[in-house]
Image (tube, grey):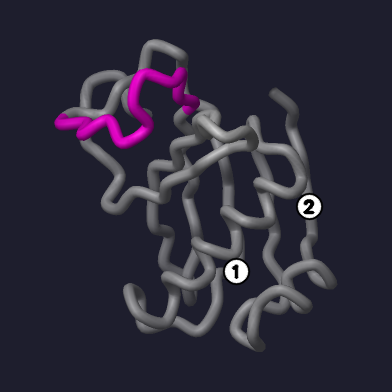
Amino acid sequence: MRTRTLILTSVLALSLPAFAQQVSFTGQTTANDTLLVDTLRTVALLGPGQFNCPTVEAVEAQALPESFSPPGNDNPEGSNPTTYERWDATFCGKVVPMLIAYWPAAEGGMMFRVGLPFPEAAGAP
């Protein structure tokens, strides 16, 4: 796990339409740079439809303990080990907590899921 502070201006400006030209990312994530950009792209795409906001302004990430398991988990990742993170994404000034899940794909690489709303469960910060 590593702590990062990123300003993803050029990467997101190229990969997203005008609604995400700059995102401030702080905190701890287990994602490598490619997976981080893919996850941020997905989070940013939620802005217009879910939050009536054209952009995600900032994300603060926190890796959750290995013992964390969301309530009612439908386990789409199968038996693969899953890493969970809490991302507090800011859309037009409103902070929205999200549950991010990362797990290894059967064919190689990594898969991810963005969960809304963040589960209210014992052990969830």
Q: Which residues are magenta?
A: 72-83
Q: Residue at x 19, y 28 (%)?
A: 71
- Furthest residue in direction bottom, as rendered: 18
* Residue 11, numbered circle: none
Q: Which residue is mark 2?
A: 6
Three-letter code, disc 2: Leu
Please provide percent x and percent y for residue 39: 57, 53
- Furthest residue in direction top, as rendered: 67
Q: Residue at x 64, y 30 (%)?
A: 30
Q: Does residue 82 appear anywhere in the picture?
A: yes
Please provide percent x and percent y for residue 53: 44, 81
Residue 123's place in the image compared with 10, above or below, is: above
Q: Is residue 74 magenta?
A: yes
Give the quarter of the image for residue 48.
Answer: bottom left
Q: Residue at x 66, y 77 (%)?
A: 16
Mark 2 nearby-residue class (10 Å; few <14, some 14–19, many ≥20): few
Q: Is 5 situated left or right of 19 in this image?
A: right
| Viewer-proximal residue among 36 and 96 | 36
Please provide percent x and percent y for residue 107: 57, 35
Q: Distance between the Cα atoms at labels 1 and 2?
A: 12 Å
Question: SS class of the residue under badge 1?
Answer: strand
Residue 61's place in the image compared with 52, above or below, is: above
- Furthest residue in direction right, as rendered: 10
Question: SS class of the residue under badge 2?
Answer: strand
- Furthest residue in direction left, as rendered: 72
Q: Which residue is mark 1?
A: 57
Quadrant of the snapshot with the C terminus: top left
